[in-house]
Image (cartoon, rainbow, N blue to C red):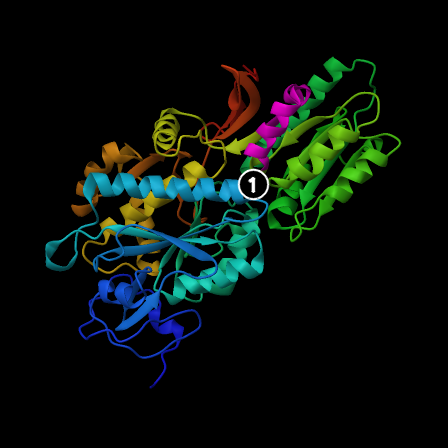
Amino acid sequence: MASYMPRLLVGLSVLMPTVACSSILGLGDYHEFGCAHNSECISKAGGQPAVCRNHVCAALLSEDCTKVTGPIDNDNAILIGTLFALKGTNQTSGVARTNSVELAVSEISQTIVGLPGGAGGKPRPLAVLECDDSSDDATTTRAANHLNDVGVFAVIGPEGSGLVSTAAQNVTINDGMFLISPSATSTSLTGLNNLVWRTAPSDLVQAIALRDQISQAEVAFRAANPSVTNVKLAVVYQGNPYGQGLLDAVSKGLMLNGLPVADPKNTGLYEPLSYDPNTLDPTAAAAQVLNEATPPNLIALFGTSEVTTKFITPVESNWPTGMRPFYVVSDGGKKQELLDLIKSNNAIRTRVRGTVPGTAGATFQAFSLHYQGKFNSTPAVFGMAGAYDSTYILTYTMASLGSATPTGATIAGAMKKLVGGTKLVVGPDTLSTAMQTLGAGGSLDIDGASGPLDFDLAAHEALSDIDVWCVAILNNTTTFESSGRHYDSSTKAMVGTFSCP
């Protein structure tokens, strides 16, 4: 038998083969088969998810891609992929973001069944192949290759800037796949390629809010410790595009002790501490802080779950007698692990604050209620709302293509349809209106659960407000809450007063 190379499957989202299926394409096993329907391939796979692509049966599950959501037995189904951490350090947030995609798909399926243009005039429902990136380059590359091999042309994720770069440079750009990340914020991704987009803004924007909050944390620390003359700041960051990019952006214009942070009078009072982004282990940085003769009074943390589990936790447990530090945490650290730590040690609560793209407006509140109804938990992770929005964005762009089979390139080209048109909010209540508008050749101007989605078509990212959050106890529940202060993208200024409920 002759062999097919996996790249023959690229971008084939909806195909109608015409001959009978004889076997299954499994992991690393590519053969020439014939098939007419997905159901034949599922049967051949013993009931496991499989699709018929270019006359070839493809088994959808792999060591990294372990779940399919949606009616994959429907030959009209359009298959998209997700790529988030479903194992390892960032599993909690990865699962939450994947769940957010599932929520959007369920709403879309219940509201309009699917996109128009299927065979025989039938709708084309969405199906999702959910994959793990394990927060490492090797897994991300392997999973992205599998998504390409089974015909996925659009991927939501990964969550981190470094992993987005890995997936894009190693797989998706060369293979013509559209990639949209809900939470990657590194400046290195701005305008990277027309196939790489994100719902989050560049860290150049978040840096404005972080500088503001480091300064306000200094004021709060001085109020609690009036005897202090010079405040010392440590910045603990992942040594990758996300952490390094934030450090560089925040440092420009940062004030400490009433002077620019680089002023000679601040020598020894500003301490950047990087850690390995592959191991995600800032334990050594924690030990260094604890062993210093004069430990820092302010600590900015640019990482993910590990900044709580492997930095704040050991620092708080082993802190010497005296003034404890105040923490300013970037978007990646706004995780359940931080809430869990504060539940067990409430003394930390008033010393922690942070920033995150988006604001908790009415659209986010609607998303939050829908998410709670489906998963019985409250959205508390940056990128969840963006993952939800990204699913709708793919739906809108594909709808604008009519009955044409979507590809990465055509979806990228259709992003212009989401700028400057009919104003509406993302969600099931406006979905029919969106489909009618796009079907008639119109455009949309969408506000998402993650904030205003005013896409810069050259930078491939959405402008956004940046919320300043704190940790509150409401109805005996420890929760992230908006502080009332935020960066307003329309006025390009910090507005509001910090007040933690």
- The spot of residue 389 in percent (x, y) is 37, 40
- Residue 195: tell me if it is visible: yes
Query: Residue at 23% of width from left, 72% of height from top?
Result: 35
Question: Foreground: 231 or 37?
Answer: 37
Question: Foreground: 198 or 259?
Answer: 198
Residue bearing mark 1? 203
Magenta span contains residue 334: yes
Query: Residue at 46% of width from left, 60% of height from top?
Result: 144
Q: Residue furthest left?
A: 120
Residue 72 lies, with reference to residue 103, above or below; the image says below
Position of 387 with respect to 266 (left or right) is: left
- The spot of residue 457 in percent (x, y) is 39, 48
Range of magenta residues: 333-353
Query: Residue at 30% of width from left, 52% of height from top?
Result: 127
Q: Residue furthest bottom?
A: 1
Magenta span contains residue 171: no
- The spot of residue 40 in percent (x, y) is 23, 67
Residue 46 lies, with reference to residue 286, above or below; the image says below
